[in-house]
Amino acid sequence: MKASIPVYLFLSPGLRQFYKFLIVGCSNFALSFTVFYLCYQKWHIFDRFLKSMGSYGLVVSNFMYSAGIESPEGSFSNFIAYSFGILNSFLWNKIWTFKVFNKTKSQFKRFITLNIFCLLLSTLIIYIFVDVLTISYKFVWVTTMAFVTFLNFVFNKFWVFENITR
């Protein structure tokens, strides 16, 4: 007798939302990487930012150089790319994944809070298991990201995008 997984499990509304959530996550990866690449490799966005500040940019540049920081081009580009990813994720999850069209301001505050929490939690987990306990970073990173993604989905579904009108 062959065991099979019932098809309705793949078609349940909650699972469809999870699949959509994962698709949005993949689009965030593609968008964030593209923005990071453009800002860092093509546009040199931090250098342009400093130049746009005129003499203040020169002061900031000299201060950073004296502190041993040649250029935070990578981290500045990552901040911009991550911001694009957060905005993309919020909009697509609100409109497509969870289909909730009210309370945008409070949802966005909760969304940002949740993303900061997930970032801190994943960083703490990686610190403990990789830096302190010296477990393989690949295993820890993949496991941590899977856990945090699931946690992020649950909190998005039941806290951030909770449909008040139900």
Image (tube, rainbow, N blue to C red):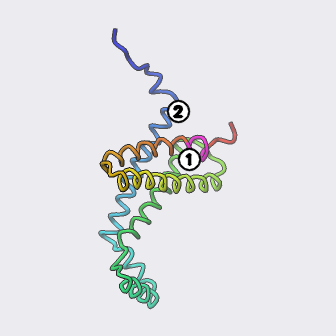
Residue 131's tag is: none
Question: Which quadrant: the N terminus?
Answer: top left
Q: Residue at x 60, y 41 (%)?
A: 158
> Residue 119: image x %, image y %?
47, 55
Disc 2 marks a residue whose amino acid type is: Gly
Q: Residue furthest right?
A: 165
Residue on which disc 1 sits: 94
> Residue 94: image x %, image y %?
56, 47
Q: Residue at x 37, y 55 (%)?
A: 132
The quarter of the displayed image where residue 131 is located: bottom left
In-image side of 89 versus 161 (left or right): left
> Which mark sits nearer the N-terminus, 1 or 2?
2
Foreground residue among 139 and 65 = 139
The quarter of the displayed image where residue 113 is located: bottom right
Q: Is residue 97 above or below residue 121?
A: above
Question: Which quadrant: the C terminus?
Answer: top right
Q: Are marks 1 and 2 in contact (CB under 8 Å)?
A: no
Mark 1 and mark 2: Cα distance apart in space? 15 Å
Residue 14's tag is: 2
**Where does the magenta region start and end?**
155-161
Residue 94 falls within the magenta-colored stretch: no
Disc 1 marks a residue whose amino acid type is: Lys
Give the class, few, some or many, for how many residues have Cα within 10 Å of label 1's Cα (few <14, many ≥20).
many
Q: Residue furthest front?
A: 133
Q: Residue furthest top?
A: 1
Residue 157 falls within the magenta-colored stretch: yes
Q: Residue at x 33, y 69 (%)?
A: 40
